[in-house]
Image (cartoon, rainbow, N blue to C red):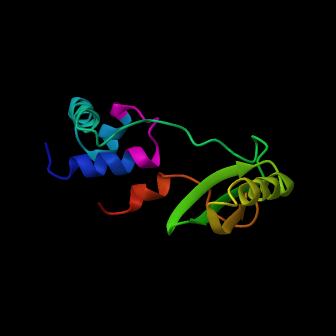
Amino acid sequence: MRKELPQQLLGELLKNSKRSDRELAKILGVSQPTVTRARNRLEQNGTIQDYTIIPNFKEMGFEILAINFAKMRPGLLSIDVAFYKNFTEYLDRVSLMRTEWKDFVEDIQSFVVPIGEGAFKRLSLTYLGDVPI
């Protein structure tokens, strides 16, 4: 097996993990059994941990992705990553964090991303398929 095959296979699977071993073999220029063995090795050694989907969060009814950073006492940092149906739901969550955690939190900062607006890349790992490993 080619030394670089596992990395090339990972790149192709990141782009589209639904492709068959036969399709991947054609792209990578090796036999289908070679791809199957390489994939199995990657799964067994834990390099591939899961195959999953990334849904269209806008279609699921979410408008906002927020990453909330809470500076906790004594000097700890808490990170809360969540999807919200609307801005009111997001504000309610931050308000709840400020009131319920008031004895533990010094400050809360948020990074808010509107879902489905503008020319942003969608949330996906497919972009890693072109990154050299």
Residue displayed at 50% across by 36% down:
52
Magenta stretch, residue numbers: 13-22
Coordinates of residue 91 in the picture (x, y in percent): 81, 58
Nearest the viewer among 56 and 69 is 69
Nearest the viewer among 58 and 85 is 85
- Residue 87 occupies quadrant: bottom right
Nearest the viewer among 115 and 104 is 104
Residue displayed at 38% across by 36% down:
23
With respect to residue 106, does 9 lie above or below?
Answer: above
Nearest the viewer among 133 and 64 is 64
Q: Is residue 84 magenta?
A: no
With respect to residue 31, does 102 lie above or below?
Answer: below
Q: Is residue 116 visible?
A: no
Coordinates of residue 71 in the picture (x, y in percent): 58, 68
Q: Is residue 20 magenta?
A: yes
Coordinates of residue 58 in the picture (x, y in percent): 75, 48
Q: Give the total number of marks visible in the rendering.
A: 0
Residue displayed at 71% across by 56% down:
97
- Residue 37 occupies quadrant: top left
Left/right placement of residue 50 relative to residue 3 reads: right
Coordinates of residue 17 in the picture (x, y in percent): 44, 39
Residue that protrudes farthest toward the right in the picture: 88
Residue displayed at 61% across by 54% down:
81
Q: Is residue 71 visible?
A: yes
Q: Quadrant of the C terminus?
A: bottom left
Left/right placement of residue 55 relative to residue 45 reads: right
